[in-house]
Image (tube, rainbow, N blue to C red):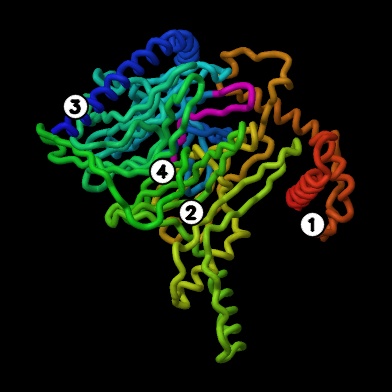
Amino acid sequence: MGKKGKRDKKGKGAEKTAAKMEKKVSRRAKKEEEDLEALIAEFQSLDAKKTQVIESSCPPPSPRLNGSLSAHPERDELILFGGEYFNGQKTYLYNDLYIYNIRKNSWSKLEIPNPPPRRCAHQAAVVPTAGGQLWIFGGEFASPNGEQFYHYKDLWVLHLATKTWEQIKASGGPSGRSGHRMVACKRQLIIFGGFHESARDYIYYNDVYAFNLDSFTWSKLAPAGIGPAPRSGCQMTASPEGNVIIYGGYSKQRIKKDVDKGTLHTDMFLLKAEGVGKEEEKWTWSRLSPSGVKPPPRSGFSVAVGPGNRSLLFGGVQDEEEEESLEGDFFNDIYFYDMGKNRWFPAQLKGPKSEKRKRRRGRQAESEAAGDGEVEQRPPQGPLEIIKEVVAEDGTVMTIKQVISGPAEEKERSESEEEEEEETGALGQQVEPCPRSSAMVAVKHGVLYVYGGMFEVGDRQFTLSDLHSIDLHKMEEWKVLVEMDPKAQEWLEESESDEEDDDVEGAEGGEEEEESSEEESEDDEGEEQHPAVEPGENPEEYLSRTEQYWIKVARSHMGPEAKEKKVVKVAHAMAKTFHEDSA
């Protein structure tokens, strides 16, 4: 009894502390949000000038992260909404709507009157009702300097058949937040977690809300049992039975003044529904202990539901604190969670069928040549770390680390298993998305699509605009549908700009600024002519002929204080990149 009483008191104390913190954050955020409301209202007045639906073909969307990518429930289309972009000086928020035609591999922009305000880190869920509906809840708007935040608590629906936006005004819903998760479960939208941040304070949530798609009413759930700690950015999946599964996420707490400690959560929970749709609907939290190989801890991963009753997790980042710097290891791997078997396992690429046949023939020839000789035993394989380097136009070296999990223990393998392992090991030269976090993903007809996202090199952020796909049934290879445009990579240091652009223009999307920056980069390229690659010249021959030139270029970018060994390394990487681009 005593222990139980202490636990109850501790729980009530935590609830009171959370309530106080929420009031504190709310008070401080109110002034900030009032300032931003005027800016948001200005953008909405611009959007209100749109009076008709206009759909036009267009190039792929500009680089972005933290938007939403959803599969159309009836057509072979993907729907991209919102997102953000940061160029080192200014934050841009979007509320544009793009449609990707899967069969034609083409994009179109859909302008619809009275859309939701610009936002990122919102959530989107699709239901098949009345020709398809796209539901949007929450998210955040940031001032152009990225120092003030407005968190939305609005609910919108895009009627796909009629191409109309509608704001649903219903009381009793969640407070303003971003980084939350939302899934369509039976005839409800279930929302969990998220966070609210002001300039000085923040609060993370672990509350659960349900929106009834028939009655258009909100209800706050009070599940029995012990649920997840407050967090944002978790994996949330609805099972066919109408239950909800939560995995991972991120939260931080203040240890002392101006010192925060972040936590990468790796726990897993089941929110079970009993009597769904009935008046006495009950929900219960329970902890899951899955088998298999769980993903390494990370944040910023993307989630989707794949075929075969499996949810999946793609990419993300694991931040490592080193002295006074924060360095992130970015991922581009896929992990599956089998909901029926309660089991995690990493995805393994099998390679194209033509490559399989070549390797099989090669193995047969080796076997015949060896005769009855002893077969060399392979040592056990542990986790494999692959390091790639990409050089930007300004000489910045982007080091991308990817960790591939090896088998937990060595066991006797059949010939087919060894072949599969060889196939996996031979994929180093295949095309794949570069490691990233905050990408937008969707699954349609068993194919996973990955768009955009970001990765960091030092203090520099690279925002992506490429599109990749992989067939989750075959798991053979990634396909590049839209390549990354190097000209879209813009990064402005604070010292590079003598003038501050108008705030409204900056938050509006910055399309004109992007165009002008492209023109400037083209002009710069015209001024400096690199040594051309001669016909038939391989990378080694080209490097041997032009090495001193590229060392000079690398030195000019890196400065006189850079170490010679590092300069040579960068010069070789720049020469190789230029050779590949020229080829």
Q: Is residue 574 magenta?
A: no
Residue nearer the viewer, 437 or 59: 437
Q: Calculate the distance from the C-alpha at mark 3 to the C-alpha at mark 4.
A: 29 Å
- Where does the image place residue 520, in percent across and percent down from the top left? 75, 28
* Residue occupied by mark 4: 303
If you read the primary sequence from the N terminus, does the residue marked by circle 4 or circle 2 appear first? 4
Three-letter code, disc 1: Pro
Q: Helix, strand or loop at disc 3? A: loop
Q: Nearer the viewer, residue 500 or 135?
A: 500
Name the quadrant containing residue 280: top left
Q: Amino acid at mark 3?
A: Ser
Distance Cα–Cα, label 2 vs label 3: 38 Å
Residue type, numbered disc 4: Val
Q: Earlier in the sequence, mark 3 or mark 4?
A: 3
Q: Earlier in the sequence, mark 2 or mark 3?
A: 3
The residue indicated by pointer 3 is 215
| Segment tinted magenta in the rendering | 78-92
Q: Which residue is mark 2?
A: 470
Foreground residue among 174 and 477: 174
Q: Which mark is residue 539?
A: 1
